[in-house]
Image: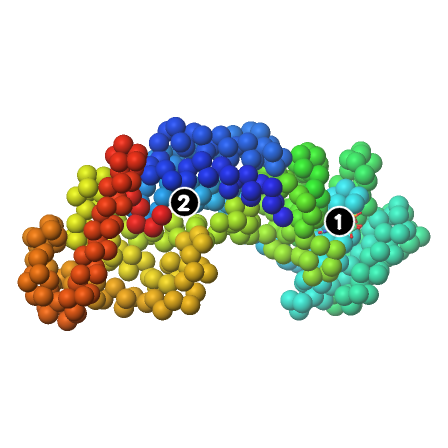
Amino acid sequence: MFENLSYKLDKAFQTLKGKGQITEINVATTAKEIRRALIDADVNYKVAKEVTDTIKEEALGKDVLTTVSPGQLLIKITNDELTKLMGGKQEDISLEGSPATILISGLQGSGKTTFSGKLANYLKKQGRTVLLVACDIYRPAAIDQLKVLGEQIGVEVYSEPENKNAEQIAENAIKYAKDNGKSTVIVDTAGRLAVDEQMMNEIEGLKKSLDPSETLFVVDSMTGQDAVNTAKVFNERLDFDGVVLTKLDGDTRGGAALSIRTVVDKPIKFISTGEKMDAIDKFFPERMAGRILGMGDVVSLVEKAQQTFDQDEAQRLNKKIRKNQFDFEDFLSQLQQIKKMGNLKDLMAMIPGMGKAIKNLDIDDDSFKPIEAIIFSMTPEERSNPDVINGSRRQRIATGSGTTVQEVNKLLKQFNEMKKMMKTMNKMSGNKRAMSAMN
Ligand code: GDP
């Protein structure tokens, strides 16, 4: 699902890789790439433009935390915007009334009948007693198809093959449901290959007479922009309550999922990802955004960092790194901020590529203890100017911190290497680059 879009978005973020800071130029380039990726995935041009304009604005308004790189921050911002675009929150169908009635609308071939069966199965598993109603008065085969599905999932199917009045069939079905103690009625309707007036009149009439608790519009996500246009026409006539996106298991470019919500202002409630009766899922905008970006781990990392990190402190450290004045005091502060973010192993596992590498390593928050103890045993002068730490000072620090001279030496060596690396990186980008503790 969405492989192409995910790949292109990933490429868009690559343009920021290695960049230490968010600037108007690099954000504009990345935003342009994101827009192109969205349009290629069939996202409506206007929607794509609005989204990327917001991403740009958000990115420029945010300071980069020392723990996350600009690329990571932009992924998080894009993730949030995609989530918003798809409606933000998950929304359920209404099952009010007795029986609760659900009207299924959409074009022929969109997957209405299959979805009706899936929804019946899904609601049955939640303990509801469901009646499926075959209201396609044009295609006897559609009635048979529903009957086969009903048998498969153990749900009764109501039909009147000789009756050509859909409203009457639905009315009789409701009566039948009441008489037989069914809590839920799902009405599968006739569809045409394209929107036509007669079909629209018919389903409009059916909606009026049935007054369902929920009207769903089923749309094939493979049809791209057409899906959005059909949704618009159905919404104008039916004012439906929610959208069902089908065939998301196929090679869909995803644009429909991303544009429908904005264009018709109705939530996507379910997605269908296969022909089997259990291939149905509630639609969670956030999860879908995560799947599209394929970078859920980076998003959680930035979220955690944003929740925990002190922006002023991050700024201060950034400045010191750039001026090559990073000292043990700063190092200690970084350690403590990282510790605040929670379990170290979980945290490190979120860094792309790290998961596997640290799986068998024994890291816990205690790993920091000897390092902290060593720094605590240094005098303020030693912390800000580690070069003064000679042999006898090393011995004193080791004794004071309950460690060994070897451990003190090791930390001093690591610290020097880190500083050297920061210096090289600063030089490489003309002092513009802020080192991040995690990239
Ligand atoms: P209707 O004419 O709207 O009732 O559509 P159907 O339910 O008959 O579905 C049309 C075709 O699409 C059938 O061959 C279904 O098996 C297939 N189909 C429906 N939903 C999905 C889905 O989510 N994924 C895939 N791959 N095929 C589906």
Q: Position of residue 98 (x, y in %)?
A: 69, 61
Question: Secondary structure beneath disc 1?
Answer: loop
Is 274 placed above or below 233 here?
below
Question: Secondary structure beneath disc 2?
Answer: helix
Q: CA distance from mark 2 to mark 1?
A: 38 Å
Please name the residue shown 46% across and 39% down the image.
14
Residue 114 falls left or right of residue 51: right
Some atom of ligand 1 lies within 8 Å of the CB belonging to the residue at label 1: yes
- Which one is in front, 277 or 232? 277
Please name the residue shown 68% across and 45% down the image.
251
Q: Position of residue 248 (x, y in %)?
A: 66, 48
Q: Is residue 156 visible?
A: no
Can you identify the residue that label 1 sits on? 111
Q: Residue furthest bottom?
A: 402
The first of marks 2 and 1 along the sequence is 2
Please name the residue shown 67% across and 37% down the image.
224
Is 251 placed above or below 354 here?
above
Q: Amino acid at mark 2?
A: Gln
Location of residue 402 by image quarter: bottom left
Q: Amino acid at mark 1?
A: Gly
**Dot label at residue 359:** none
Can you identify the residue that label 2 sits on? 72
Location of residue 192 by image quarter: top right
Location of residue 229 by image quarter: top right
Residue 379 falls left or right of residue 359: left
Mark 2 vs 1: CB contact within 8 A: no
